[in-house]
Structure formats: structure tokens, C-alpha cells
Amino acid sequence: MKKFLSCFCLLIAGMQWTAVAQDDSEYDYETPVYTRKGLMVGLYIGSYFPNAYPASLYDGYGYDLEGNKNSFENSWMYDKINNQFGKNAPNFGGIDQISLALGVQPDQWFFDTEEYMPFNMRYKTVFSVGLNTRYSRDGKNGVLFNTNASIMKAAGNFTIKTTPPPNSTQINNSFQTFEISGEEQRLQFQLGYQGVLGPEEGIQFFIEGGLHATLAKFVKNEIQINDLVIDLSQEFQYNNGAIYFTGTRPVGLGFGAFAGVGFDVNTSGPWDLQLVYNPLLERVNIGWDPKLKLSQSVGLRAYYKLTKK
């Protein structure tokens, strides 16, 4: 947030300096004056704080070919860890890569209970960039259409149990924790109203709100056991030539609403800058039982005014 405020202040200072320079110009031609009326097109960059609810999509259970969430025994993690890369891999012409990654014998590690599945799945804060447009007939009240994009990262942890080797002085079992991660693409569309509360020029407060839609796409789901990285949703080909596919990567479009408040900096030049905070009532329509949940974003818009007075 401090970085956005610093950038916003620097942009304001630059715009004011430009305005002064234009006023002191010795040229004899008239400097063009731009207005907020008409169409404005601009870029957006900000930080996006998604709610954690859809992050459970990347908890390792995965989805079958019909989009239903798997049970533990049919989960992507159970299949990858135990069958494709683990103890049962030699039955299909493979090797137990899990034991090699753990540095133990095949009979000294276990992933056989649901208690070892991932927990605390959370999204990381990400950047969002987009193309934002505004159309106004009077310079104060306008119609917005925004398109913003972001790449989401989710992370959590899971557990594998290892037992002491024979004749070891170690008494208790060891529970090792490893990371699971997910990646998701989102496109957000907003159609709504924006009202600037004050004169057309200068620094003014504004409000906005309207309809919000989120197009979300599952990209990948990985686990890492020391140096071994396994893509849970990837097709797997055994040495005997058989190809096994664990499920589907969900894609979905969900609808909600957005609101916003912020400060608008407008001069007689072609640029209009906005610092904006947006609470988002967002439905991410992928995963199990999607629901409307609150997300947030804060960012900078730089509009270019296309209309001259």
C-alpha cells in the first residue's frame, strides 16, 4: 500500500510540474485542453487480495473426468504418491522415486491416511493488470468497463510419515512436511457506474460500483518432496506404454458485484489518474461448491482522455 501511495504522489507531482511548465511556456500557440467528457482509455496496475475459499481446489484431491471432487483413495495425491511415483510404481515398470527423494527404504515411508493431506491452503497476494475504460457525457458521471488479469498462486502443506530403519537408535516415527502449490488464471470483467464528487479539475473523491464477473481457469497443481517435483494433474505414461489421466482441469465463469472509492487527479492535460480501492463480492465458479465471497484490490489507474475542449 505504501508503494502505491508513493507512486501516486510522484505522479501527482509530475502532473503539476507539467501544468506549471505549460503555463510558463513562451510558445505563442495555444496548449490543448482536455476534458473528462467522452471516452477515456487507460491502464490499471494493482495488488489483488483474493479470498481463500477457492484455494481448496488445489488441496490435492483433484476432480474426476465429470468434475466431481475425488475421495482420498481416488485423489490425485494418493495416486501420484503411492502408485505412479511410489511403492506401487514397480508393478508398472517404474521405480519408487518417493523413497529416493526421502532417502529411506520403500517400506519406511507412508502416505496412507487422510490426515496427511494438505491443510491451510491459501492464495498469495498477486499483482493485477488491466485495460480500463470510462465514458461520460458531463465529465462527472460515467460508465465503466474494466478488464483485469492476474495469475494466482496457492500454497499449503502435506505430511509423509517415515519410520526408523532396523537397528536404529531412533524411537519415534518422523513426520515430514512438504509444500503443495497451485496456479490459476483469472480474468475479471466489471461494468458499472463511477461518479466524481467535485469540480472537473483538481483532486477529487469518487465512488463506483456495478456488476463483476470472474473467469477462472485451473492451470496446474504440484507437490514437492525435497528435490522431486510432481505435477498432480499431468498425464502419466507407464513404461508399458499405457497412459493414465487423473481428471479434468476446471474452468468457470462466476458473477458478483464490485464497489470502489478513491481519489481522482485531473488536470487540463491528457492524463487522469486514480488511486482506487475495490471490495469485490466474487464468485469463482470452479472447484467444489463455489460461493460468493469477499475479495479486495487496490491499485492505480492512468486514463488517457480522448476529448478536447
Image (cartoon, rainbow, N blue to C red):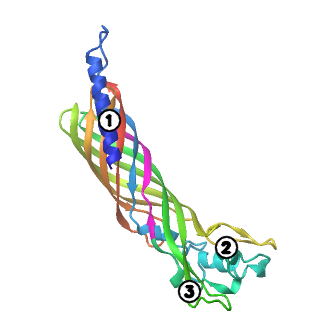
Residue most toward the front?
Answer: 169
- Is the residue 35 above or below the residue 163 in the image? above
| Nearest to N terminus: mark 1 or mark 3 | 1
Residue at the (65%, 89%) spot, across then down = 168
Q: Mark 3: few, some, or many residues within 10 Å (few <14, many ≥20)?
A: few
- Inter-mark Cα distance, 3 to 2: 20 Å
Q: Residue under label 3, please give it.
A: 113
On residue 10, the disc is 1
Instruction: Assign a secondary structure to mark 3.
Output: loop
From which residue to which does the magenta span run?
A: 121-134
On residue 101, the disc is 2
> Seen in the image, is 302 located left or right of residue 239?
left
Q: Mark 2: few, some, or many residues within 10 Å (few <14, many ≥20)?
A: some
Q: What predominant SS class does the magenta segment belong to? A: strand
- Is the residue 118 above or below the residue 200 in the image? below
Residue 122 image offset from top left, x and y in percent: 44, 67
- Inter-mark Cα distance, 1 to 3: 55 Å
Q: Mark 1: few, some, or many residues within 10 Å (few <14, many ≥20)?
A: few
> Seen in the image, is 8 located left or right of residue 122?
left
